[in-house]
Image: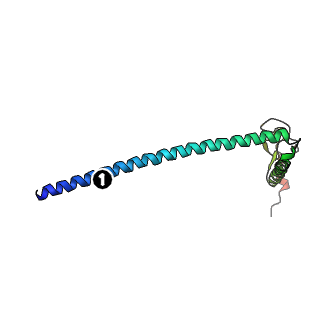
Amino acid sequence: MGFMDKVGEIGGKVYNTASKTASNIADKSKVVAERTKLKHKINEEKSLISKKYAEIGKKFYELNKNIMPEAYVEEITAISNALEKIEELNERINALGNETTCSSCGGKIQKDQEYCHLCGAKTGYESDKTDNSDEVIEVKADDIEVQ
């Protein structure tokens, strides 16, 4: 067996080993990709469950906030207090800016709007109807002093 035959044999072994390694890597990559895809789907389902739990809880709260079943007094009270605090904080935010809440639809409007742009309700703001910005002032040449 000559030198070139040995080189060819070694080259063939290297090729076979590299080919097997590449195939193994590709197979493992497919498994990792599939596992990742399945975990993503599991997380989507968990997210859906959490959302539905929240919806059930919200419905339960709305139905029972005035009844206060004994087993849920603490939770219902905490939610009610948090909602009141949120409303108070939103009012403070509105007071800092030029926005307020429409008493009719609850939408955000500018404080100086006479009518809500969302529902058309009168806001209670009265604009200054005596705005003199268009008033024309006449000045005669005799009124001007030249120094």
Residue 124 location, x and y as percent?
Answer: 88, 42
Front residue of 145 and 94 = 94
Residue 47 visible in the current orientation: yes
**Direction bottom: furthest residue:** 147
Front residue of 10 and 80 = 10
Residue wearing tag 1: 18
Tell me: 2 left or right of 115.
left
Residue 142 location, x and y as percent?
Answer: 85, 54
Residue 132 visible in the current orientation: no
Which residue is painted at 39% across and 47% down in the image? 27
State the colouring used for the structure image: rainbow
Q: Quadrant of the C terminus?
A: bottom right
Tell me: 28 left or right of 67.
left
Assign a secondary structure to mark 1.
Answer: helix
- State whether residue 3 is above or below residue 130: below
**Which amino acid type corresponds to the residue marked 1 in the rendered image?**
Ala
Tell me: 9 left or right of 101.
left
Residue 41 location, x and y as percent?
Answer: 56, 42
Residue 49 location, x and y as percent?
Answer: 67, 42
